[in-house]
Amino acid sequence: MISDKIRQAYERLAPYYNEHIDHKPHNAFYNRPNMLALIGDAKGKTILDAACGPGKYSEILLSMGADVTGFDASPKMIKYAKARNPEAKFFIQDLALPFQTLADRSFDTVLSALAMHYVENWTLTIKEFHRVLKPGGQLVISIEHPFFEYNYFKSRRYFDVEAVKCTWNGFGVPIEMHSYRRSLQECISPLVKNGFVVDNLIEPRPTKEFETVDPRYFKKLNTFPAFMGIRCIRP
């Protein structure tokens, strides 16, 4: 199954991902600043870091005064997240399965950074995000931009949810990574149909620090987006 291949890829990738996550440009100087801006003031908030990886977002949110719980499907990623954030609560959980250990209306914010494109059918996951959020709470997600993916994977079926794969070379070891490409409509409709109100949508720009590290990609990301960020409210 594709979900098993994704988990195995992240198990292999985990030590390299943890080593690079603080400074890798697409994370540190592109996605992360824009996601944190969408989250806003985290002090005193209960936050779920869904598909937390090695816990970098959790580390930042804890430093801002948040109470953080995180999960990931990769046991090795959870090991690194716990080592990075011994005061937070982490557990193993597949993003595509029910969050059975989490209570209804228990979080002010749910964050899911660059993870939803590993889920084929978003409906259950979005319903679970809605269930665990308090009324008035926010869901903040980032995904690979649907237009970028359509071009990158040379798709001929824009409106399909399509299994795709590529090789990552940016973490020091080549990794074959599987995911699901989808249309813009298929990114927005599951949110709206399952009780959320879209509050903000951004096509992020890299920070100036990105230009120092990688001027070629800095120029590319200022002409066409690779990621997209969405903030939704649970009424």
Image: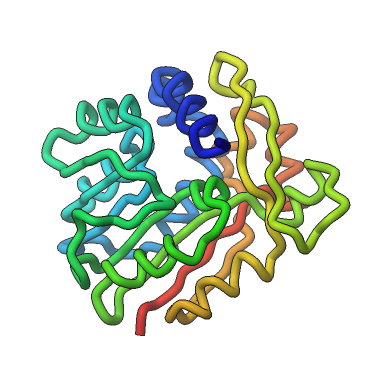
Q: Residue at x 35, y 42 (%)?
A: 52
Q: Residue furthest top?
A: 173
Q: Residue at x 64, y 21 (%)?
A: 169
From the top left corner, tell me how far across and down residue 229 is, in percent. 54, 60
- Quadrant of res 189: bottom right
Circle count: 0
- Is 175 displayed left or right of 16 in the figure? right
From the top left corner, tell me how far across and down residue 25 is, in percent. 55, 34
Q: Residue at x 64, y 66 (%)?
A: 186
From the top left corner, tell me how far across and down residue 105 is, in percent. 21, 72
Q: Nearer the viewer, residue 110 or 75?
A: 75
Classify the position of the N terminus by image quarter: top right
Q: Residue furthest right?
A: 156
- Residue 156, compared with residue 195, is above or below; it is above
Please say whether residue 55 is visible from this viewpoint. yes
Colour treatment of the image: rainbow
Q: Residue furthest left?
A: 87
Q: Residue at x 52, y 61 (%)?
A: 122
- Is 184 displayed left or right of 8 in the figure? right
Q: Nearer the viewer, residue 182 or 68?
A: 182
- Residue 17, compared with residue 204, is above or below; it is above
Please say whether residue 65 is visible from this viewpoint. no
Classify the position of the C terminus by image quarter: bottom left
- Is 217 displayed left or right of 48 in the figure? right
From the top left corner, tell me how far across and down residue 195 is, in percent. 43, 81
Q: Residue furthest front?
A: 1
